[in-house]
Amino acid sequence: MSRPVLATLDLSALRQNLLIVRRAAPDARIWSVVKANAYGHGLDRVWNALGATDGFALLNLEEAILLRERGWKGPILMLEGFFHADELELFDKYRLTTSIHSNWQIKVIQNARLHAPLDVYLKINSGMNRLGFMPDRVHTVWQQLRGLRNVGGLTLMAHFADAEKPDGITHAMQRIEQGAEGIDAPRSLSNSAATLWHPEAHFDWVRPGIVLYGASPSGQWQDIADSGLKPVMTLRSEIIGVQNLKAGDTVGYGSRYRAGGEQRIGIVACGYADGYPRHAPDGTPVLVDGVRTRLIGAVSMDMLAVDLTPCPQAGIGTSVELWGQEIKIDEVAAAAGTIGYELMCALAARVPVVTV
Ligand SMILES: *Cc1c(COP(=O)(O)O)cnc(C)c1O
């Protein structure tokens, strides 16, 4: 590792966050959502720290197989089900729970040759209008699936579009109730936001993702500041250059930042090719030598610039936290007009990762 950029994963934070989820939903079982390579953290690095979970939920067959090959024997939920009929053979071999959200999937599972029935999550379209059956179709589909020898346990599943808002699940819950009327089956409805903020939606299995990694489902760190949740990923680098600006001097591509007077700035070895958002504006918080300062100038591919005015002791080799324990990923994301989810998922492959 020569270039100083480095992501550190705090696995004890991951374990702790899972415990906090358990306390938030004490009567539900937990699908730990590890899609997108565990939200950019690396499934292979982190799954074991989540070993106290009841199941893993993801949507990529390769990732499901990896979990089985590493020895995970518990349930695995494929959130989007199978994409093509020929995948059923692997769902059978690796004993994967599948969601079913479209009619064609019913035919496929009906006609498949399986060694044993597969557990199925029947997906209700709760109003988000991505995947799932309309409420008035649910009863028919449920009857159909219940009659198939290839279908084992049946669970009703839905997903919320607005669970981070205080009254954000009312409409969706009405639709779910309408679809589920008269059906005696377990339910799995809650993402992180509903797990934290809508206990009435917990039911049998919750499906938290982002909170396990210690960021906020609302995009606002303050919303989880008192929860005990701790960021898992810290992205650090070092100052590799220092410049002393005079009034009118500019910084970086497009000369977006212009110094108002004499100013000392640091150049940090981290850019958008590492996953730092190029859209981050002047003023985005950065921690230099433990002191909060701000990004200045456009983020380039491999570097970014920071104001050293509040930390005159900093120089070449000084440690910089881009996000992590002190600078929350939600703060950086909000400044750049996105959410922590996107930043953690976009951590670039060239960034070395260590676990502690
Ligand atoms: C991603 C996802 C989740 C987890 O969402 P978070 O907001 O990260 O908690 C839960 N359920 C489904 C269907 C998902 O796609």
Image (tube, rainbow, N blue to C red):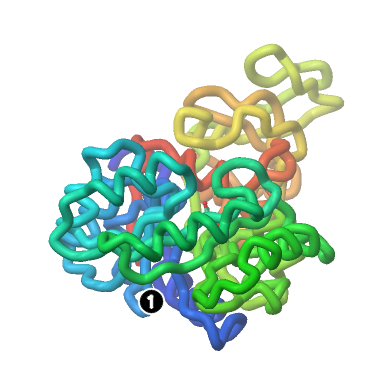
Task: Give the quadrant of residue 249.
Answer: top right
Residue 248 seen from this side: yes
Q: Name the residue under label 1.
A: 54
- Residue at the spot 79% in from the left edge and 21% down from the top edge: 258
* Nearer to us in this view, 211 or 294: 211
Residue 7 in sight? no
Disc 1 packing (10 Å; few <14; some 14–19; many ≥20): some
Which residue is painted at 33% across and 65% down in the image? 119
Residue extending furthest toward the top: 254
**As rendered, which of 291 and 216 lies closer to the eye?**
216
Give residue 136's position: percent from left, percent from top. Answer: 65, 53
Q: In which quarter of the image is ligand 1?
A: bottom right
**Relative to 245, is 347 above or below?**
below
Residue at point 72% right, 24% down? 245
User: In the picture provided, is 108 more to the left or to the right than 11?
Assistant: left
Circle 1: element type: loop
Q: Which amino acid does label 1 sit on?
A: Asp
Q: How many marks?
A: 1
Q: Viewed as shown, does residue 341 lie left or right of 91?
A: right
| 243 or 125: nearer the viewer | 125
Vertical placement of residue 78 versus 268, above or below: below
Question: Residue 184 at what x, y percent from top left?
Answer: 53, 77
**Can you say whether 54 is above or below 129 in the image?**
below
Residue 234, image x, y percentages = 50, 56
In the image: residue 158, left or right of residue 85: right
Quadrant where the C terminus lies? bottom left
